[in-house]
C-alpha cells in the first residue's frame, strides 16, 4: 500500500480554534499537581460538530482536553463524567480505548465539565479518503471490514470485568431510546420546524411505537461509532484508538450497528444522505449497509430478523442530532456557517428514515 502523508495530529488553524481560558485552566491544573503548557496555546483538533477537543501538553507529554460545545446543551448530552468512568478501565479489555487521566466537574473553570484523556497518535477519515487511498477498492474493503470487526470486538467485552456492570439501564433500553429521541426531536424543532418536518416526526414516532421490539442481549455500546471516531495508523491502517465515548452505555448491540449504518452512505442514496458527509463509504470497495450488517451478524451471532426497527430508530436519531445542531444556529449559540443548512438536511434524513420504514431502503 502506498505511504500516506498526513500531518499528525490533524489540527485546526489557530484562527479557527475555539478559545478557552488557558490561564485559568493552567492554575486549576497546577492545584491538581498537573503542569499545563500554554505557550504556544493549545490547538483544537480538526473535524467534528459537537464536543471540543484540544491537543494539550501536560507534564511535558501529549494529552487531550475534551469539553462540551459552547452554549446551552440538550439534557443528558455530552456527559464528561460518563465518558471518564468508561475510559477509566475499558482499556483493560478493549485496548483501543484511551485511558482517562483527569475529570473536572467544576464548571467555574471552563464553563462546563471537562476531562483529560490519553492521546493516541493516528489519523481519522471523515467524508473522503486522501490521496493515494481515494478510489482504492482494496482500501475501502479493508476500512469497511475494520469498522465491523472493531464494533464486534467491543461488544464482546464483559462489562463487569472492567467495572462497568452498573453502567446505564439495559432493561427497557430500546423503549427508552424510542421515547427519548421522540422527545428530543420535539424539543429540537421548537420554533422553527417546517410543516413537512413536523409531519415526518409525527409519522416516524407512530411507526417506532407500533413496531417496538424487545431488547436483545446487553453489551457495552459506544453509541456514536463511525469512521471518524476510529484512529488508524497512517502507514498500515491498523486501528490504534476509538474516540468519543460520552454517549457510552449498556444496551442492545444492534442499536450500535444501526447507528453506524445511519452514517453509511451508498452511491445511489438520496441527496440528504450524500450531504451527511460522515464516512466515505460510497467510494469503491466499501461493503453496502446490508453486507456490513450481515458481517456483524456473523461475527456476533445476532439475528437480524427485526433489524428494520433498529435502522429506523437510528436513522431517526441521526436526523434529530442534526436538528439539535441546527437549533444551536437558530438560537445564536454558534455562528459557524456550516450549521446554517442543517435544518434542511435533517428533514431529508427523516425522509430517508421513512423510506427505510417502508422497506424501500436497507
Image: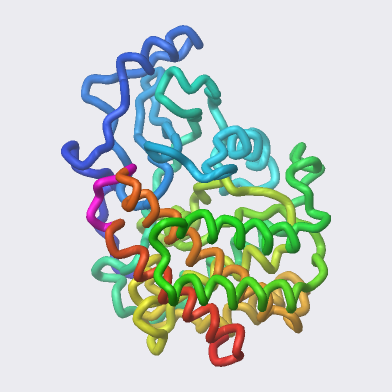
In the rendered image, residue 359, in percent from the top left (x then y), is placed at 60, 90
Q: Nearer the viewer, residue 325 or 139?
A: 325
Q: Nearer the viewer, residue 179 or 132?
A: 179
Question: Which residue is painted at 68% across and 77% down in the image?
Answer: 309
| Left or right relative to 5: residue 214 | right
Q: Using the rendered image of the protein, determine whether residue 323 is visible from the camera's viewpoint.
A: yes
Q: Is residue 335 magenta?
A: yes
| Left or right relative to 37: residue 210 | right
| Left or right relative to 46: residue 185 | right
Q: Nearer the viewer, residue 233 or 192?
A: 192
What predominant SS class does the magenta segment belong to?
A: loop
The N terminus: image quadrant? bottom left
Query: Which residue, as the protein is rendered here, is positioned at the far left?
Result: 15
**Magenta part of the chain:** 333-338
| Left or right relative to 191: residue 181 | right
Question: Which residue is painted at 35% across and 77% down in the image?
Answer: 274
Question: Which residue is painted at 39% across and 37% down in the image?
Answer: 71
Q: Is residue 118 magenta?
A: no
In the rendered image, residue 131, in percent from the top left (x then y), is placed at 24, 69
The image shows residue 309, relative to residue 327, as above or below, that is: below
Amino acid at each position: 500500500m502506498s505511504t500516506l502523508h498526513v500531518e499528525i495530529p490533524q489540527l485546526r488553524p489557530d484562527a479557527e480554534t475555539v478559545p478557552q481560558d488557558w490561564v485559568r485552566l493552567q492554575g486549576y491544573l497546577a492545584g491538581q499537581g498537573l503542569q499545563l503548557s500554554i505557550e504556544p496555546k493549545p490547538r483544537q483538533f480538526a473535524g467534528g460538530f459537537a464536543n471540543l477537543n484540544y491537543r494539550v501538553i501536560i507534564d511535558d507529554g501529549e494529552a487531550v482536553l475534551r469539553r462540551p460545545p459552547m452554549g446551552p446543551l440538550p439534557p443528558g448530552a455530552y456527559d464528561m463524567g460518563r465518558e471518564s468512568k468508561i475510559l477509566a478501565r475499558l482499556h483493560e479489555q478493549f485496548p483501543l480505548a484511551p485511558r482517562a487521566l483527569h475529570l473536572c466537574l467544576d464548571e467555574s473553570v471552563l464553563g462546563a465539565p471537562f476531562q483529560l484523556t490519553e492521546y493516541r497518535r493516528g489519523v481519522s477519515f471523515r467524508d473522503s479518503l486522501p490521496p493515494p487511498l481515494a478510489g482504492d477498492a482494496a482500501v475501502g474493503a479493508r476500512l469497511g471490514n475494520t469498522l465491523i470487526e472493531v464494533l464486534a470486538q467491543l461488544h464482546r467485552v464483559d462489562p463487569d470485568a472492567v467495572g462497568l456492570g452498573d453502567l446505564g439501564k439495559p432493561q427497557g433500553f430500546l423503549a427508552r431510546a424510542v421515547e427519548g429521541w421522540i422527545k428530543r426531536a420535539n424539543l429540537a424543532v421548537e420554533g422553527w420546524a417546517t410543516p413537512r418536518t413536523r409531519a415526518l416526526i409525527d409519522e416516524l414516532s407512530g411507526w417506532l411505537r407500533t413496531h417496538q421490539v424487545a431488547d436483545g442481549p446487553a453489551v457495552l455500546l459506544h453509541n456514536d461509532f463511525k469512521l471518524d471516531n476510529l484512529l488508524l495508523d497512517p502507514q498500515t491502517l491498523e486501528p490504534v484508538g476509538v474516540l468519543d465515548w460520552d454517549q457510552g452505555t449498556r444496551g442492545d448491540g444492534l442499536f450500535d450497528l444501526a447507528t453506524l449504518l445511519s452514517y453509511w452512505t451508498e452511491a445511489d442514496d438520496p441527496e440528504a444522505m450524500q450531504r451527511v458527509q460522515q464516512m466515505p463509504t460510497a467510494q469503491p470497495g466499501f461493503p453496502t449497509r446490508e453486507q456490513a450488517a450481515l458481517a456483524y451478524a456473523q461475527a456476533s451471532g445476532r439475528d437480524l430478523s427485526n433489524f428494520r426497527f433498529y435502522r429506523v430508530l437510528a436513522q431517526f436519531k441521526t436526523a434529530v442530532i442534526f436538528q439539535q445542531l441546527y437549533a444551536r444556529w437558530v438560537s445564536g449559540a454558534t455562528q459557524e456557517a456550516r450549521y446554517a443548512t442543517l435544518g434542511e438536511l435533517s428533514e431529508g434524513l427523516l425522509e430517508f428514515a421513512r423510506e427505510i420504514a417502508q422497506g424501500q431502503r436497507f
